[in-house]
Image: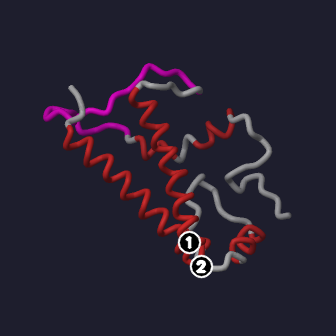
Amino acid sequence: MELSEDNKKALLLSVHKAIEEFAGDTTDNLFHNRTNMLISYPPNGGLTESEKEALGQLKESEVLKSALRKVIASTTADVFFDFFNIVDGTTEPDTGIWSEVLIIDKPNDFEEYREFLHDSFFETYWDWKEIRNNTNWSLDLSEEVEK
């Protein structure tokens, strides 16, 4: 079993489309002061009032918008590239027990019930936070102190 060319192309094109759309939406939200639309990760993430004020100081310009879209898109693409390397077996996660995985076409006789990765993604942030090495800053607001 393997991933068909059609499914591989559809999957990868969907990723490219999402990267472009999210980078555009994020910059639009930045410049229209829609800070409540900027943070969905981690589960209790958000911006402090001082962070919102700092972002509010950005002055909209087409050049800055273009630069930020490129930075956001590139960073997002880097995450996907690392993820695909793990799935492809060209690298391994440096946390947890790992035995490799595959993305394959779904067989016709596949049992429909299964746990979904997207359902577990946000809840495993807390596991990550517990084992991560960088304790100088946090993405979530649980330890945030207004400065």
Image x and y of residue 15, in percent: 37, 51
Residue under the image location 31 percent in, 51 percent down? 13
Q: Which amino acid does label 1 sit on?
A: Lys
- Up the image or down, 43 lies above or below 85; here it is below
Which span is picked out in magenta? 95-115
Q: Main secondary structure of the magenta part?
A: loop
Q: What residue type is labelled 2?
A: Ser
Query: Between 114 and 36, which is closer to the camera in this rendering?
Result: 36
Q: In which quarter of the image is the N terminus?
A: top left
Image x and y of residue 73, in percent: 50, 56
Q: Which numbered dot is residue 65?
A: 1
Residue under the image location 32 percent in, 53 percent down? 14
Q: In which quarter of the image is the C terminus?
A: bottom right
Query: Between 38 and 70, which is closer to the camera in this rendering?
Result: 70
Q: Do the residues labelled 2 and 1 touch (CB within 8 Å)?
A: yes
Secondary element under disc 2, as helix, strand or loop, is loop
Structural distance between the alpha carbons of marks 2 and 1: 6 Å
